Image (tube, coloured by chain):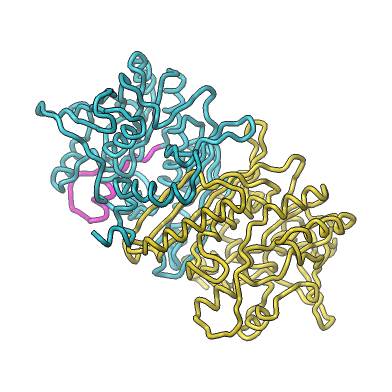
Chain colours: A cyan, B yellow
Amino acid sequence: MADKKQHILLDHGGGGQLSHELISGLMLPAFRNDILAQLNDGALLDIGANRLAFSTDTYVVDPVFFPGGDIGELAVNGTVNDIAMCGAVPLFLSAGLVVEEGFAMADLEKILASMGRAADAAGVKVVTGDTKVVPRGVADKIFINTSGIGQIHAGVNLSAEKARAGDCVILSGSIADHGMTILLQREEMAFEARLQSDTAPLNFLVARMLAASGEIHVLRDPTRGGVGSALNEIAVQSQVGIRIHEDRIAVKPAVAGVCDLLGFEPLYVANEGKLLAFVAAPHAEKVLAAMHEDPCGRDAAVIGEVVAENPGTVVMETRIGGSRIVPMLTGEQLPRIC
Amino acid sequence: MADKKQHILLDHGGGGQLSHELISGLMLPAFRNDILAQLNDGALLDIGANRLAFSTDTYVVDPVFFPGGDIGELAVNGTVNDIAMCGAVPLFLSAGLVVEEGFAMADLEKILASMGRAADAAGVKVVTGDTKVVPRGVADKIFINTSGIGQIHAGVNLSAEKARAGDCVILSGSIADHGMTILLQREEMAFEARLQSDTAPLNFLVARMLAASGEIHVLRDPTRGGVGSALNEIAVQSQVGIRIHEDRIAVKPAVAGVCDLLGFEPLYVANEGKLLAFVAAPHAEKVLAAMHEDPCGRDAAVIGEVVAENPGTVVMETRIGGSRIVPMLTGEQLPRIC
């Protein structure tokens, strides 16, 4: 236990309890400012007459190439999505590469081409960059930071603090695809299941949703830590209770099978092309209808609701009719998932 | 030689010839867009009625703590300076950390506190962040990406393409302090010389300069690759010749001594608190006077001039009265300098 306080552990980067302690204990005191303290997926900035969203993420995924994508596509989509979750149109990205000496030029070329295609697909431009090469053994293959700037849709004010009792909780599709895909690759497990990462840009889906309703309160993409951690964060920040229904949360059979076998709870497994939306109940139907028109929202469903009781807590009604608390994730399930 | 084409070498990140080949050969084709293609220290963006500068850099310096600063201070100042070189007021930074499992919490705390102090000193806010923890051995201690947004001063249009024959080349102070400090630390050399990094935010110096004259054409901070590489980049991008005078370029005696002893050419050694300015000759005096008022510009001097002959080439008149070409750096002098 002493070590927890004295050294950085994998858990500190896992998106769960220790990550939160690191942020509240070290980051917020070091950088104390109101914007950071909002702890949204990106920062909401007023510059002149513009309302901008600004976000950053470093991708250290292992392996670099995986079914359904690669680190380059992930790095573009991930930051595009963080910007989109702020209710903004992503416009510009930066790319900061750390490459290990000896990395194959052909692989770098594939990764950069993949970033370029992903940027085109999402309608953003990679406008500035930096490349550091470090000696062999100083970094594993390649890490990519992307930071992004987006313009917040007029009249939109989303924040993780804005969930209200009565809101419907919408999930855009099946969960745990990305995390279990990476795990299978890494362990070189000989499963027959052909899983595939769900990495995708969600900005067009978000634009449809925001056009359909002015009563969307929170958007969040459940990446590291999964749906379970994202819901807990929102429950805490909005000081509300959240009730979800296990039988409404889609998990593909192959993904569910691998989770079962390996003892992973899909609720905590990373997604890279899914979002959670908190919507005033009377607007849920039209938001859902808009989502169903988009390839990334075809399987969107209401999976739960916000309640006034037990603020800060997420409760799941299980398939067998019971109910249990879904705690904040403690312990890193899987390092280098993104 | 075959390997050069097939694998990433340290030189690809050194800021010299191979870095440029990597950028022109892989980055520009992958991300093809006009903004990136300008190859300034940051991207110049029009968003609504705002003109913004956007820049990114990842810091992998080894050691993490060094005389005169640490990786946290360097990461803030470095991106503040890239934004300032675009003629912008730096406003907001992101911080993306990759930390090795087992890194001492006390060191992380020191680094974050140092980032916070540097941000305060430069008048910027760290508004969004990300922390990845990777298993022991996957990254060496800590890497920090900072990206930044600034607002371009009204009426200012700087670009590496804007140097004109007749411009004076101003250098803000002595060179090679940062690079030689890091080298001495790393090699644990028992020199008596007490070198110190020059890491500093240059945004206030730049604001004074821009207030003093509307005829500043280019600003550049000569970091990786040093003054020699920065001048070559500008000579190529502006298609002009540059002539500099060795006896006007300040190198502190202790720094010069260490460079001599170890065979380093100070012109190619990294600086982290210096800038080069290209200024229309009639304005040079008033720009210099403004610089001398600022702690970061106290030793500013005109070190050369832009000429029409030999576009793309930098020539130095040496102390002994000869002249020689200062080529683009080939080969990485020193990895992990920033």
Task: Single out the residue that lies furthest toward the right.
Answer: B282
**Whole-percent x and y of residue A251?**
22, 34
**Whole-percent x and y of residue A303?**
25, 25
Q: Quadrant of the C terminus of chain B?
A: bottom right
Q: Is residue A86 above or below residue B189?
A: above
**Whole-percent x and y of residue B243?**
81, 68
| Residue appearing at x 19%, y 45% in the figure | A264
Q: Does residue A24 appear left or right of residue B60 in this picture?
A: left
**Residue B16 visible in the snapshot:** no
| Residue appearing at x 50%, y 66% in the figure | B61
Task: Single out the residue that lies furthest toward the top.
Answer: A282
**Quadrant position of residue A325:** top left
Task: Single out the residue that lies furthest toward the left.
Answer: A320
> Between residues A83 and A189, which one lies in front from this camera angle?
A83
> Between residues A64 and A225, which one lies in front from this camera angle?
A225
**Quadrant position of residue A255:** top left
| Residue appearing at x 51%, y 40% in the figure | A54
> Between residues B17 and A235, which one lies in front from this camera angle?
A235
**Which residues are drawn in magenta?**
A181-200
**Quadrant position of residue B221:** bottom right
Q: Does residue B46 appear left or right of residue A184 in this picture?
A: right
**Whole-percent x and y of residue A127?**
58, 46
| Residue appearing at x 26%, y 28% in the figure | A242
